[in-house]
Amino acid sequence: MNAFSFVIFATPLFWPVAASAQLNVLISGGFSGAYEQLLPEFERTSGIKVTTGSGASQGAGPQTIAAQLARGVPANVVILSREGLSELIAAKRIAAGTDVDLARVPLGVAVRAGSPKPDVSTVDAFKQVLLKAKTVAIPGSTSGIWLTTDLFPRLGIAEKINVKVTPRGTDATGMVAAGSADLAVMPVSEIVHAAGVDFAGSIAPEIQFVQVFSAAVVAGSGGIEGSKRLIEFLASARASEAIRKSGMEPLASSR
């Protein structure tokens, strides 16, 4: 996860458009917190109305972004993990050269609001927290795939912990908030603003998985100039504060 690609459009951020201009966006949970804060300003300053739908970056089931695009759900722009976007690019679902990395985020641990926050700052401490938990919730998308296929087996605990894989990150935090899971492991950006949970901390650097969230224009969709304007806005310096407040590090605006 050390190499990042950036595409910055040279066109101005804002210029007059028809009042009827409209975009459809499909977004995964990781970047949603920042996006929801930023969207009203984009609509107000650009005159473009945006309709937003959601889906998982990767995984199985009918609500992944790839599955929605495959069955014809209208979308001009997608925002999802770089791993999920790479799959869409390989499937020729993305307009060539329009992908931009927006932000990156580490994995953290969520616990029920008000409960003691366990130490997860070292490999052994994190491992012991998982082993003591009755149920560990993880989203069934990019981070959850990595946890179940890479980290948990590498730590030697894959067969020793009770993992509940949920369709979306909101389902994982919902389980923790309801008390049906002791903790959730997921991108920090999906924890910090979730209702009913507290952020216990990021997992140890030695076992960390830093996700990059990216945006791109859907191949064959109309309104390509408006789509590029939205992506440029999300990659601009004015979006940086909202991105940081959501637990992420802005990428494109640092260039």
Image: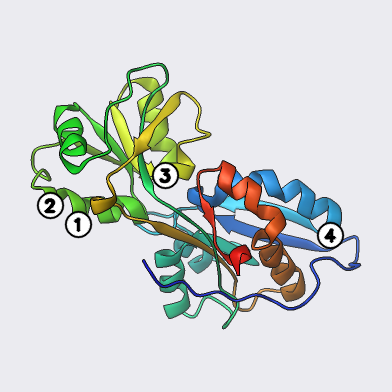
Spatial CA distance of label 2 from label 1 is 6 Å
> Can residue 198 be seen in the rendering of this structure?
yes
Q: Identify which amino acid the numbered label 1 is placed on.
A: Asp
Q: Secondary structure at mark 4?
A: helix
The location of residue 144, given as percent across then percent down, is 30, 50
Q: Earlier in the sequence, mark 1 or mark 4?
A: 4
Q: Is residue 56 left or right of residue 72?
A: left
Image quadrant where one finds the C terminus: bottom right
First reached walking from the N terminus: tag 2 or tag 4: 4
> Would you place residue 110 above or below residue 254 in this image?
above
Q: Is residue 51 left or right of residue 135?
A: right
Residue occupied by mark 2: 153
Quadrant location of the N terminus in the rendered image: bottom left
Q: Nearer the viewer, mark 4 or mark 3?
A: 4
Could you say which quadrant of the image residue 46 lies in? bottom right
Mark 2 belongs to which amino acid? Pro
Dot 2 crowding, Cα within 10 Å, few <14, some 14–19, many 20+:
few
Q: Residue at x 70, y 71 (%)?
A: 228
First reached walking from the N terminus: tag 3 or tag 1 = 1
Q: Kindly identify which residue carries mark 3.
A: 168
Q: Which residue is mark 1?
A: 150
Give the class, few, some or many, for how many residues have Cα within 10 Å of label 1's Cα (few <14, many ≥20). Answer: few
Q: Secondary structure at mark 1?
A: helix
| Dots 2, 1 in contact, CB < 8 A | yes
Relative image position of residue 166 (x, y in whole percent)? 34, 41
Label pair 3/1, CB-CB below 8 angstroms: no
Residue carrying label 4 = 46
Locate residue 33 relative to residue 64 in the image: left or right.
Answer: right
Q: Residue 250: horizontal and vertical position, in percent?
A: 56, 57
Residue type of the residue flagged with mark 3:
Arg
Q: If you read the primary sequence from the N terminus, does the residue marked by circle 4 or circle 3 appear first?
A: 4
